Image: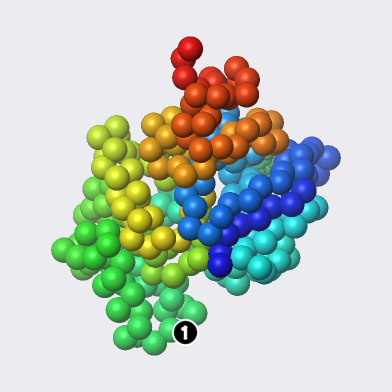
Amino acid sequence: MSGVNLQGVVKRFGEVQVIHGVDLTIEDGEFCVFVGPSGCGKSTLLRMVAGLEETTSGRIHIGTRDVTREDPAERGVAMVFQTYALYPHMTVAENMGFGLKMTGHPKAEVAAKVREASRILKLDDYLARKPKALSGGQRQRVAIGRAIVRGPEVFLFDEPLSNLDAELRVEMRVEIARLHREIGATMIYVTHDQVEAMTLASKIVVLRAGRVEQVGKPLELYHNPDNRFVAGFIGSPA
Ligand code: ADP
Ligand code: MG
């Protein structure tokens, strides 16, 4: 069981409050997409789930564990960012295995996990290459591979495809959907792309100025947006 639950989650940066008491339940194995305008708090919420940002008040649970004050490394989450920050001097295989290697896992286990991730992401032929010899899409696959290798209960994606051109975005979107089907882990995915949201999500959370505006299945929101704001993001044009 590794759903994610947020109860009354608040975030303040100094005097400025940017998240105003978010309550949210994401079921085990769900693909939950956060949408909302720039600056509404999508990344901040994700970073609080990851433990990269302290939660000012409220509770965050992963499965039955209260992780609110846990270190990022203990939470069983892995995050994929828009900029993939691969180590330029390491091969694809080394990049993917680095996290596990550093936490003392045996070489054979790391190698097996890297092989499995490269199979899922179709990177088998690229394992010996350095990042500079890869396309943008392949680099983002390696970044996703790095997350898979760690075997997280929850994957967090912060606009992972925004830096890719339109054609690659479509290809990677299909890959991410396949990854979710194959691994079945809980995923939280931030995007400003309506098509990504509609096609990937089992649940969409519309955020506005640090609050949840509406939550629902993609078609529910599409056909029954609560207001013009939600309609503007994902509602039908009617
Ligand atoms: P989004 O990802 O939806 O574009 P963010 O979560 O990045 O939004 O930001 C939400 C709000 O919090 C914005 O107003 C942003 O300026 C502010 N913010 C984010 N990080 C910090 C920080 N480290 N210090 C101060 N303010 C921040
Ligand atoms: Mg952001």
Residue 96 % position (x, y): 35, 67
Residue 47 shows in the view: no
Residue 122 shows in the view: yes
Residue 47 % position (x, y): 61, 52
Q: Please tell me which residue is depicted at 39% across the width and 87% down the height of the picture.
A: 106
Residue 36 % position (x, y): 57, 31
Residue annotated with mark 1 = 104
Considering only vertical position in the picture, is 197 above or below 5? above
Badge 1 element:
loop
Q: Nearer the viewer, residue 138 or 2?
A: 2
Q: Is mark 1 within 8 Å of ligand 1?
A: no
Q: Quadrant of ligand 1?
A: top right
Q: Please tell me which residue is depicted at 35% across the width and 49% down the height of the picture.
A: 177
For residue 80, side relative to residue 36 (left or right): left
Q: Quadrant of the N terminus?
A: bottom right
Question: Outermost residue, top direction?
Answer: 238
Q: Nearer the viewer, residue 131 or 145?
A: 145
Considering only vertical position in the picture, is 127 above or below 175? below
Total number of numbered labels? 1
Residue 234 % position (x, y): 49, 26
Q: Colour scheme used in the picture?
A: rainbow
**Which corner quadrant of the image does residue 180 belong to?**
bottom left
Q: Please tell me which residue is depicted at 35% across the width and 50% down the height of the picture.
A: 176
Of the residues shown, which amino acid type is indicated by label 1?
Answer: Gly
Considering only vertical position in the picture, is 60 above or below 223? below
Question: Outermost residue, right direction?
Answer: 15
For mark 1, does the 10 Å Cα neighbourhood hold few (<14), some (14 to 19), or many (20 or more) residues?
few
Q: Please tell me which residue is depicted at 64% across the width and 39% down the height of the picture.
A: 41
